[in-house]
Every structure is written in structure tokens, then in C-alpha cells.
Image: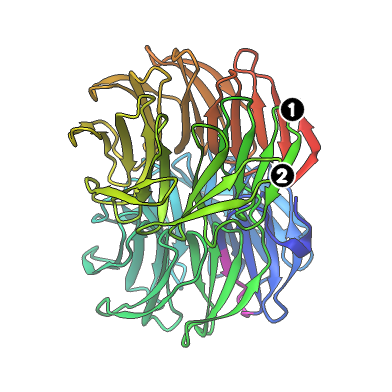
Amino acid sequence: MSSLLEGHSAPTWMVTWSPDGRRLASASEDGTAIVWSVAEARALVRLTGHAEGIWSATWSPDGALLATGGNDGRVGLWRAADGVRVRWLEGHTGAVWATGFSPDGRLVASGSADTTVRIWDAGTGTLVHVVRAHPALVKDLRFSRDGSRLATSCDDKAIRVFDTGEWRERACLWGHTHNANTVDWTPDGRQLVSCSHDRTVRVWDADGGAERVRIDAHGDDIDAAAVSPDGKAIASCSHDRSVRLWAVADGRALGRIDGHGDEVEWVAWSPDGRRLATASLDAGVRVFDAERLAQIARLPGRNRAVSQLAVRASDGLIALVQGDRRLSFFDARLQPCGALEAVHARACRALAWSRDGRTVVSAALDGAAHVFSAPPEPRRVATLALAGPAHALALDPRGDRAAFGLDDGSIDLRALSSGEALGRIREHDEPVYALAASPDGATLASGGRDARVLLHELGSGATRPCVGHSDPVLCLAFSRDGQRLASGGRDRIARVWDREGKLRAELHGHTLTIHGIGFSPDGRRVATSSFDTTVRIFDADTGECLSVLSGHTREVSALRWADDGRIVSGSRDGTVRVWDPESGAARAFLPHAPEQKIGV
């Protein structure tokens, strides 16, 4: 865990203002919430006790208490002044994504992945009511200013409104075509504002349910939208790393804030409407002047989460990148053998060893690909200026060609040695999040935000689809013989395809997004890593789950099944674990403090 002065050490999911506008509370994947002094730009107190990441941190109306919701399924009530926990509110059977106090401070509402909303007495902790009207994860909830209604957003794409007398559903607002992420009231209680991964912000009539305004707001998923205290403006934030302002009345664009190094997860207006606070995947919290759209404070945080890793085939040398963009190398005995700081200006999204193992290649949202020499003296030896921000890369196992998946949906083909442009593949409609090259170098597989997996024959130019995913595809891997392809993503189901694009197996079991995938050296098994904190091993032919590897305490963001038979996984808990797939035993270490061996 980071010291208080260092701030958060993993992605920050939410930030909220105290009622007097003097403090902020942030919730993080590192399992803590921090109370900050805005004027001094420093941390005042850290709230600890959740066993896993914290999704939500919200203030009581008098600013005395904070309610937190964690991935461990608990709601915590804390004294904001000194961080002392008042009590746990327990009863949810899934992660708690949303919390909120009623305007009079007497009730706390919590929304969970178990599909329920629970209403608690804030003074005693007694469960008052359970709302069972949602068929999927409840992402957000807000009381109206007069406390007579509660609005919720849900993964089933709907916004719902409940009365707080008998907790009956008064309205269900349909229109979003993807997960409804946040919901907020206008001050007069007449309208609701919501946002979604469908990239829209919508303004609704709170009573009749009619959609009043639709704003095509961002070029990527929108995680949060908030109404200004005067009810005239909306602030939205997105995976495109921007914050944008819109008029509530007609959806006009009012301004834009750029400069975040990674996805912006939350945005909140100060009570006086003069400032905006943001939370980001880079672990930072920032404060902006809402009129000048200029940053006025940046609160400390360093993302130690392991975001990318690659294992050299010849000797098991591990290269990895953390959220703070630090590139580190570890030998097969997990001993450090070199590191470079801040290798990219923005988040690194892909990492791979060259076929001869002499260099490692990275690609990032800054639009650059770097080539680094391997230890014992790692250094940057070349840079390729790509055609745009990059999310994925694949290297030709038999040649000099490199492919980069870009934000605009294209694949940028380059000669790795010279940087020469070899062409562009334009088949995806949205960002390309995953690439894999077949062992013979003849086929390039791509997966994107458009939920498509495509097989590109580089010789003939032919493209074949693999049809099955319903949400963005985030990871791909070929078997060593090149006859099968495995894919995974946000729909939580991994799939195995043959070389012709026919579905051969579906791998079920994960409860959250699959972010890493790989075949065993013999091709008989597939390993997957997920935001549900587990690594799972499946039979590649039947889809049967053979084992679940548990140990990580946060989202598992990277995975490789190495040629020597080990499975290597990296997590947002800041650890790397090296697993024996037969016994399930693991060795674990902290890349930023490798002398601390934390498990066997």
C-alpha cells in the first residue's frame, strides 16, 4: 500500500466533493479511499479495511460521514474527519458499485452486482428495504433533491426511478444501447441525465420517461456524467481521456478538457459549480477551473498496477509495464535485471518480444511505438511514430513486420527495423483493442470495440470474421501450431476458433471482463485472466473449466502462458504471480519492490 503522501497506487474510480467544497473523497482499486484537502492539495486521511478495490465513496449531507462500496460486497460507513470506521453494512452477495445518502442523511442506498439495491438506516445500520427490480448489475444511484425518488442506472441499459415511500418503480427509461453507467438529477427534479458505453449522454423527462436530448458526446466509452449545481451544464468523461461540457437544454458543446494520460473514470462538480474534479485510470485526482477549463490542482497518485507483460521464449525473461509507464525486467528466478522510467507520455497498451528476443516493443496511447534493447543494459533504441493512439501490437514471428491496432479502427503495418509504412488495414469500425499473429506469419487476427474478431490473410488480403462476441474484444492468442485462435473480452465468455473462423468452444465461468488469454504450449488448454481477480484454465476442446487460480486481490489485467509451461499474470493489485498450472501454486512479487516476495 502507498503512503498517504503518495496517494493512490492503482486506478481511481470515483471522486466526490464534500458539501462545503473544501474536501474531496476518492475511491480506488488499491482498496482504499482518501480524503483530500483541496486548498492544500494534500491527503488528510486514508480509509482502510475493504478487502478489495473500492468503487464508490460518497458524503453524508453534513459532511461528517462517508459511505464506501467495495468489490468485497461490503458498504463501509466512516468518519470523514479521522477515517475511523463506524460500521460495516453487510448483506450484498456481489461487488457494491454505488452508494448514496438520502438528502436528510437518514438513509444509505447501495447498488450491487448482485442486482439489488439495499436501503439502510444510516444511524443504526439496520436494513430497511431491498429493491429487487434490476436484472443486472446496478452501476449508480442518486436520490432526488427532495428525497422522494431514487434513480438508478443498470447494466441492462435502463434507467429506473423509484419512489422512496413504498420503493415502487415509477418509471423505466429505455434508449441506451449499452450499459447505463451513471445517472444524475437536475436540481429541480424534473429531468435525469445518464451516460453509457454507447458513447451518448441523454437527458430524460423524469416523470414521463421521454428522451429530451441525445448527445453523441465522445469517441469512446463514457463512464460518468454529472449535472452542474445550477442545472444548466453537463460534464462527461470518457475512455478517450477527455472531459467535455454540454448544455442541458439542447446538448450544445460548451467546452473540452484534455491532458489526462489515461481513461477518465469520473467527473464531479464542486457545490458552487466553479470547479470540476476528475478520477483517472492513472491513479490521479485532478481539479479544474470549470470556466477557464484549466487545471488548478493535481493530487498525488502513482499507478503501480501491472498493465502489460511479455515473456521471452528462450529463457523466461519477463518484461512488464506498470500504470506509471515504468518498464521493468525480471529473470526466470524473478530477480530484477533492469528498469526504465516513464517510457511513454501516455498509457502503454501493448508489449511484445521481438522474434530473436533481443528487443522488446511497446505501443501506447501517445501514438508511439518504442523498441528497447534487452538487459543487461536496457535502453530505447528506436521509436516509430504511428498514425494514431495505439491499443495493440503483434510482431511477425518469421519476419520484420509489426502490426499496431489504432484508435481509429485501422491496423498500421510497419517494418520494425526501419519504421517504413507497409500499409493500413481498415476493416474495423471502432478502435482495435487486440492483435495476434499466427506462428507462420500468414494470418493476423484482430479484435475491436465493435465486438468483431477478424482473420486477415496478409498474402491475399482476404478477411474472414469469427462471429460470436457481443461486446468489445480485448485479447487474442493463437495456439503454437497456429490452428486455433482464442479470444476474450467484455462479454465474459472466452471463445476458441479454428483457422477458418468457425467456433469450436465457448469457455464460461468468469463474472467480469476477460482481459488476458493464452494457450498452453501443447495447445490442449487455454488460460484466461479477468477483472473478477481470477485466472482460469479451460480444456481447449470441450470448454470445461479445469481449475481456478486465486490469489490476486484486484483485477487481473495481463496474462501469458510461457513456453516453459509457467503462467505469468499481472494485476491491478500491483503484483506479478508465476503459477504452476498443474498444482495451482504461485510465486508472487511486487515489481516496484521486488525484494518483497509476498507469496509462495
- On screen, residue 308 versus residue 574, left or right, reads left
Magenta range: 15-21
The picture places residue 132, in percent across and down from the top left corner, at: 41, 43
Residue lying furthest right: 595
The structure residue drawn at horizontal position 52% and vertical position 53%, both measured from the top left corner, is: 382
Front-most of residues 546 and 347? 347
Query: Quarter-wise, where is residue 57 in the image?
Result: bottom right
Residue 117 horizontal side relative to residue 22, left or right:
left
Q: Mark 1 points at which residue?
A: 333
Q: Nearer the viewer, residue 351 or 447?
A: 351
Three-letter code, disc 1: Arg
* Residue 19 is covered by the magenta coloring: yes
Answer with mark 2 or mark 1, whichever residue precedes in sequence: 1
Answer whether residue 347 is magenta in the image: no
Q: Quadrant of residue 78?
A: bottom right
- Is residue 437 placed above or below 323 in the rendered structure? above
Residue 376 percent coordinates (x, y): 71, 40
Q: Residue furthest front?
A: 418
Q: In the image, residue 161 lies at what x, y percent?
A: 35, 58
Residue type of the residue flagged with mark 2: Gly
Label 1, residues with CA under 10 Å away: few <14, some 14-19, many ≥20: few
Left or right, 10 with reference to 510 = right
Is residue 149 in view? no
Residues under labels 2 and 1: Cα distance? 14 Å
Mark 2 closeness class: few <14, some 14–19, many ≥20 residues within 10 Å: some
Q: Which residue corresponds to the image point at 74% horizontal and 62% vertical from the top-left?
A: 6
Label placed on residue 253: none
Q: Mark 2 = which residue?
A: 338
Report x, y in % for residue 483: 33, 18
In front of the other: 533 or 126: 533
